[in-house]
Amino acid sequence: ATMAPLCVSMSSHLAVVAPTMRSSARTAPKPAVAGSAARRVARPSAALCAPNSAPIAQFSGLRRVTSTIRCRRIAKRSMRVGTTAELQAPLGADEVPVADMNTILSERDACGVGIIANLDGIRSHKVVEKALMALGCMEHRGGCSADNDSGDGAGIMTQIPWKVVEAWAKEQKLSFKQESAGAGNIFLPNNEAEAKKARELVESTFKEEGVKVVGWREMPLDQTVVGQFSKETQPIIEQLVVESIDGKTGDELERQLYFARKLAEKKAKTELEMADDFYFCTMSSRTICYKGMLRSVVVGQFYLDFQDTDFETSFAIYHRRFSTNTTPKWPLAQPMRVIGHNGEINTLRGNKNWVKAREGLMQCAGLHLDQEYLRHFFPIVDETSSDSGAFDAVLELLIRNGRSLPEAMMMMIPEAWQNDVNMDADRRAFYEYSSALLEPWDGPALLTFTDGDGIGATLDRNGLRPGRYYITKS
């Protein structure tokens, strides 16, 4: 894991999907075994990768396909799991249908994720424009509902566009000190009475934690580009602007906003009837996230802030979601609060259980956080979140308690260090020590991450997800 800012674009390729209720975005899946899409080859026995597939089991993330080969009037069937199949044919079999490469490559799935960053940290609107363009090029990476217009999720995380926020504050005759202020986009229940209760809960809770609510900004939106299913489940979206009462800045301010948000989330579970529709996309003095159940090509149209030339940032993490493990929901769209994730966390249940088991022992004497105070923020991992959300929650806990982002990432996704004879002694010692503190979150994954000060990306320890980057002249 490295924090060196890079201009990167990363994605991966998974199995092809056969017709289901949810298909790859705006792509009508096509069976690819027979007809003009297939060619005949002579082969005495076969170990073939069948080109069409369908879900194998709920939440499994695996794909299954039934394929048929004909061997001199004998038809045999075989089941495929993953990306390969063993189709056993009698010796002497001579004809097997095989899909051509164009057909195979016409279907694809799995999330798309990437970063665009100015290496000198210079903010500009061009970074926003390039991120939106790159996100639009990843439309094929995501899924859509049956209406073919309600995306599984798409979004962009950037630095807070303070020029846009300050212009709104000036119109509203509000004032704040930027160095001790924060902002975040919030999903509120799509019921005005419940939304009002949620706002009051946030304001009172934040005040308890030493944070003053400057104001609620109504998010400028274009509702015409939202699909029917997404529109039916769409929350009220508002931007919350806050300021530290005692003037905290930097990491102290980030920690203060983190605890205020966690406490508000905990209270919402018991005080709001529509608590599942209450969600902080971010609450930070550095980063902000615009996301939703959208297709990637309409994110810039839906959120009108992106069309404001005063919206400037030096980096952007962008993400297009293909929901393999959970039902699509507005809060589950990515990026999360720290990461953008493509892949699967195969050790998820064990990881979550160990985090839960440690909650009773957690404390941080250096920050004067005892067990009695910290228990107000448990559970650390929300059971309704996705594997990406669970990873993000634990990573955020680590960095808010004083660890650097590279250190936290190396703890959660360590290299395969045990048998690497070429690894230097210091790095090996770090991994060995960290393994006693935290179990690895393992599985094929590409993760992009930022805390607002630095940005980076890493692959899983086995390199099962591809990633690439380019450094341009500009």
Image (cartoon, rainbow, N blue to C red):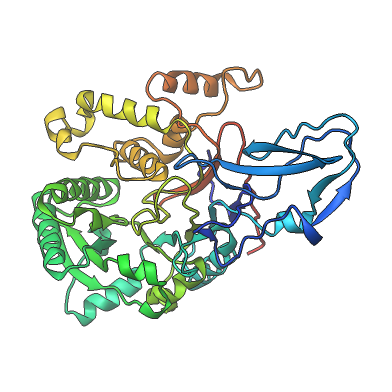
- Let me know if residue 119 appears in the view: no
Depth check: give the residue in front, 102 or 408.
Answer: 102
Q: Quadrant of residue 460?
A: top right
Residue name at image x 53 percent, y 65 percent: 131
Q: Farthest residue to the front: give it.
A: 73
* Quarter of the picture holding the C terminus: bottom right
> In the image, residue 326 lies at what x, y percent?
40, 48
Horizontally, is 280 left or right of 152 in the view? Answer: left
Is residue 233 among what the camera can see? Answer: yes
- Relative placement, left or right, of 75 versus 262 is right
What residue is rendered at 25% in x and 68% in y?
238
Above or below for 290 versus 87 = below
Could you tell whether 165 is left or right of 407 in the image? left
Question: What residue sits 47% from the left and 72% below the top?
Answer: 298
Q: From the top left corner, tell me how far across and down residue 366 is, in percent.
A: 23, 30
Q: Nearer the viewer, residue 119 or 8?
A: 8
Number of numbered tags placed on the structure image: 0
Image x and y of residue 301, in percent: 44, 76
Residue at 34 percent across and 76 percent down: it is: 221
Q: Nearer the viewer, residue 105 or 437?
A: 105
Q: What is the x, y in percent for residue 275?
A: 19, 54
